[in-house]
Image (tube, rainbow, N blue to C red):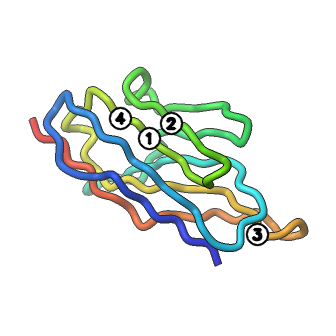
C-alpha cells in the first residue's frame, strides 16, 4: 500500500506565505509526475502545479510567479511554496503522485487527504 500525507495548510492573511508538503510512503518502486491540485467550495478540482521526475514544471496561470513546486526524490516528497497569497487561493489542496509499486506494475494515481488553505482579506 501507498500513503500520501500532506502538511502545512492553515490560515494566513492576504499577501502572506505558506509551504505545503506531501510525503509518500509504502511500497514504492518509482514516482513519476507529482502535483498539487485544489478545490474551492462549489468548484471543480483544478491543477495548481506539477513537476515531472526530471524537474519540468507546469503551473496554472493564476499562480504563475507566486507559487513554486519542488520535489525531493530521495524523500519521496513534493513541496508547494505559496507566496503573495490571495483570498481566491482559498481551497482544499491535494497532492497527487503517479506511483509504480513494482517493475512490472502499472502506474497508479495516488492522492493525499487534502489540507485546507484559507486566505483572509
Circle 2 sits on which residue? Answer: 69
Disc 2 packing (10 Å; few <14; some 14–19; many ≥20): many
Marks 2 and 4, Cα distance to the nearest angstrom? 9 Å
At horizontal 28% and vertical 40% (from top left) the residue drawn is 89
Circle 4 sits on which residue? Answer: 82
At horizontal 62% and vertical 55% (from top left) the residue drawn is 76
Pointer 4 with pointer 3, Cβ within 8 A: no
| Residue 40 image offset from top left, x and y in percent | 29, 52
| Residue 57 image offset from top left, x and y in percent | 60, 31
Classify the position of the N terminus by image quarter: bottom right
Circle 3 sits on which residue? Answer: 101
At horizontal 76% and vertical 58% (from top left) the residue drawn is 30
Marks 4 and 1, Cα distance to the nearest angstrom? 6 Å
The mark that comes first in sequence, 2 or 4, is 2
From the viewer's perspective, is 107 left or right of 56? right
Pointer 4 with pointer 1, Cβ within 8 A: yes
From the viewer's perspective, is 15 left or right of 23? left
Instruction: Look at the numbered disc 2 and give the secondary structure of its residue.
Output: strand
Disc 3 packing (10 Å; few <14; some 14–19; many ≥20): some
From the viewer's perspective, is 5 left or right of 3? left
Marks 2 and 3, Cα distance to the nearest angstrom? 24 Å
Amino acid at each position: 500500500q501507498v500513503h500520501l500525507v500532506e502538511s502545512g495548510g492553515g490560515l494566513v492573511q492576504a499577501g502572506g506565505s505558506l509551504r505545503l508538503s506531501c510525503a509518500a510512503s509504502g511500497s514504492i518502486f518509482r514516482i513519476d509526475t507529482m502535483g498539487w491540485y485544489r478545490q474551492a467550495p462549489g468548484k471543480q478540482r483544478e491543477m495548481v502545479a506539477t513537476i515531472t521526475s526530471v524537474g519540468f514544471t507546469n503551473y496554472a496561470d493564476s499562480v504563475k510567479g507566486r507559487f513554486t513546486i519542488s520535489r525531493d526524490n530521495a524523500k519521496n516528497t513534493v513541496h508547494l511554496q505559496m507566496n503573495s497569497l490571495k483570498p481566491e487561493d482559498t481551497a482544499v489542496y491535494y497532492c497527487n503522485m503517479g506511483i509504480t509499486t513494482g517493475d512490472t506494475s502499472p502506474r497508479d494515481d495516488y492522492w493525499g487527504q487534502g489540507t485546507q488553505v484559507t486566505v483572509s482579506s
